[in-house]
Image: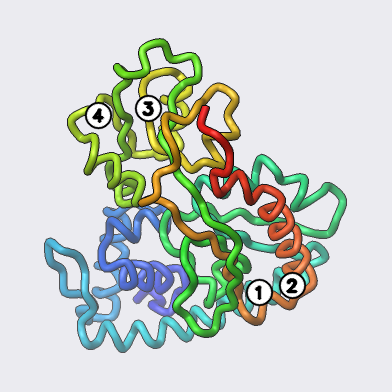
Amino acid sequence: MKDVTDWDTLRLFLAVARAGGLGPAARQTAISAPTLGRRMAALERALELRLFDRARTGYSLTEVGRALYGQAEEMETVALGIDRWRREDAPRRSVRVSAGAWTSRFLARHVGRLWSAGEPLVVEFVTATQRVDILRREADIGIRNHAPAEVRLAARRLSDVAFATYRARDAVDRAALPWIAVIGDAGITPSARWTGDRHRAEVALATTDPRMVLDLVAAGAGRGVLPCFVGDAEAGLARDGDPIPDLRSQQWLVLNEQARHAGAVRQVIDRIVALLAEHRALFEGDQPAG
């Protein structure tokens, strides 16, 4: 019998259990849903136990599945502790920074403010469309659009984030420009829903990747909603109206209470705070429309 205590298998078991299905777990683990399904079936065969109730709406744990879940969480805590020990005691300390796609793009464009060659520091960018568990040290630093509910996480309010509609600056017939929509799994964001609710009949182009909206708008293909810190930083784009009040959100720095006191983590925190404070007006859309 295969060793069912294999951590890789139990790590996937936890992912499926937390996500409530193969599809969401596949997006989080970068392992295909069919492969995850086979791994879960093999785990059940090895244990000779049914761990999940399977339905069209997803996977839910059975009573014995919940018991295994508790045991697997204990293994996860040990594994994360070993990983933390490895990273903190290594000659070069790794600091994991979790943020959404747009904020990660902003940090990458200003990476020189966070890291420089030669210093004993590795910055790991965790670009997340799904929630990253900072409490369990899946990241040391998180940038989120809301305050954390977990009482054991530290948080700091940074700024607001404004959104607006953008078009190519040299667009000739502005009134005729169609709308660009975000669909699929990425279509659950407030900006994607706003476009769908108000301009569905005018949508001519759609993408499952929000970052492609920027490329399509810059190509003059249509108009789309972007964060102001993205759209206003592109010379070829112009705002098509004022920031949208309904889409204004908050920006929070979320930290693991223990990790934030480590020297390297503290260093990156201070650099991120300084960088975002310097660009606060850009994030809040505090400039005239183009």
State the SS at label 1. Answer: helix
Q: To which residue does mark 3 refer?
A: 223
The quarter holding residue 10 reads bottom left
Q: To which residue does mark 1 refer?
A: 84
Kindly identify the amino acid type of the residue bearing the numbered disc 2. Glu
Measuring from the top left, give residue 68's x and y in whole percent. 33, 85
**Looking at the image, is mark 4 or mark 3 earlier in the sequence?**
4
Kindly identify the amino acid type of the residue bearing the numbered disc 3. Arg
Dot 1, how many residues are within 10 Å of its Cα: few (below 14), some (14-19), or many (20+)? some
Q: How far is mark 1 from mark 2, CA to CA?
A: 6 Å
State the SS at label 4. Answer: strand
Q: To which residue does mark 2 refer?
A: 88
> Toward the viewer: 28 or 12?
28
Which of discs 2 and 4 lies nearer the camera? The answer is: 4
The quarter holding residue 159 reads bottom right
Q: How far is mark 4 from mark 3, CA to CA?
A: 9 Å
Residue drawn where x is 41% and y is 40% of the image? 210
Q: What mark, if any, has residue 203 been given in the picture?
A: 4
Kindly identify the amino acid type of the residue bearing the numbered disc 1. Arg
Contact between marks 4 and 3 (CB within 8 A): the answer is no
Q: How far is mark 1 from mark 3, CA to CA?
A: 45 Å
> Toward the viewer: 102 or 85?
102
Residue drawn where x is 43% and y is 15% of the image? 171
Contact between marks 1 and 2 (CB within 8 A): the answer is yes
Dot 4, how many residues are within 10 Å of its Cα: few (below 14), some (14-19), or many (20+)? some
Which of discs 1 and 4 lies nearer the camera? The answer is: 4
